[in-house]
Amino acid sequence: MTRNLFSIVSSQFIAQLVLLLSIPVISRYYSPQDYGIFAIFSSISWILISVATSKTEALIITMDSKEKAASLSLGILSLIILFGISFALFSDFLFQNLFTNFFSSEYYFLGKIMAFTIVIMGFSQTLNCYATYLGIFVSHSYASILNAFAIVIISIGYAFFFPSKTIFLGLIYAQLISHIISFFVFLYFTKFLREISIQGFKSSFAEISKLLKKIPILLFTQLFSTASARIPTLIVSSLSGLSGAGFLGLAERIVSAPTNIFGHAVGQVVRHRYAKLFKTKKDYSSFPKMVISYSFLILFVIYATLFFLTDYVVPIILGPEWGGVIIFLKIIICAEFFNFLFLSVEDISIIRNKFLYRMILNFLYLLFLILIYLFIENSEVSYSVESILIIIYTLRSLSILYDLSVAWKCKQIC
């Protein structure tokens, strides 16, 4: 387990270091408005990916055999393709009518790009879970490093060679191509192509049909969770325009770096190990807690350092145009501790088959955010972005604490 954790953490460290070092360069090419369009595009894409996959990829780790896990993965990929085609057919209508609050009507062409993005990112996410089931953690290492380099090279290269009004496409294409690379990395290491056959497709839909009772809960749980994680970007966009959304998007990228290094890495290994312990009916309560406690101590030092250096370092590294990002950084830093813990143990409740409470919790939080958004949209009074974000992230932290208290409640298999 230590070797797997070290492999993922070291590769994530390299990947996040590459992304962090590139930010001063990227911030010189892309304005807050450009980054705001990208942030809104990504937010909507991730919400739609939740609908496309129904979060059934989280059930791959619970399968009894490799054959069943492969069949379920194949079924999920088929659903993603169907959703992507359907969205592409109606994308022009959606972008010219429903998404006009976020995008100018001249950017309707983003609909086709979003449809392809949904398919590719959904594919990558599904095979990521399949690789975790197989315990092939080296694939995560290669994927994260190649993903980071692709984002940096493509975003900077596009801005350098194609400076124009639609320069924000460089960020969108960088995200898309990086996930294409990740998908092929997972495809290679898992040898998933061997599982594709006519019989495999029949088995895939059989596996999905067996999980029909779980899928609605997972669908709404993930949809509520993803939407609630992305709606703050839309709220900030409503309050302070594309620049505000850009500030929030960049702040989240910077602050999430330590969490991506440790939180996702710990989550991958804990999920794999925990599933095995659960199947063998062994006590599992002390194992994940030990891993998380050590990682959390490191994160505390990193985030405390980030918080106190923000005022001095940001203007130098990002440039004066990005000065507005400082307050966003400080607010998100304070909330990111809890997010790390959640990412580490997110799938434990799914493995236990006790996750109905999470759907209710995510729904209540999402409802709160929607009410805030509607209130701001229909109010003639202007509100402080900082105060709204503090309320949002405080409530998010409290909901995570409750989720963690429920997730750790059982000491033995129950």
Image: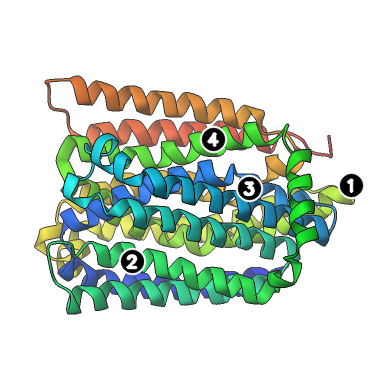
Which residue is identified by label 1? 281
Q: Where does the C terminus fall, quadrant-wise?
A: top right
Which residue is identified by label 3? 345
Q: Return the disc, 4 or 1, that comes first in the chain's sequence.
A: 1
Q: Return the disc, 4 or 2, that comes first in the chain's sequence.
A: 2
Q: Return the disc, 2 or 1, that comes first in the chain's sequence.
A: 2
Residue 213 visible, this orientation = yes
Q: Which of marks 4 and 2 is in front?
A: 2
Mark 3: amino acid: Val
Label 4 SS: helix
- Mark 4 vs mark 2, CA separation in Å: 36 Å
Which residue is identified by label 4? 401
Do the CB atoms of the residues marked 4 and 3 lie less than 8 Å apart?
Answer: no
Residue 67 percent coordinates (x, y): 82, 60
Give the residue drawn at x 27%, y 49%.
Answer: 248
Do the CB atoms of the residues marked 3 and 2 lie less than 8 Å apart?
Answer: no
| Closer-to-camera residue (8/68) | 68
* Disc 1 crowd, CA 10 A, few/some/many (<14, 14-19, 20+): few
As drawn, 105 above or below 362? below
- Mark 1 vs mark 3, CA separation in Å: 18 Å
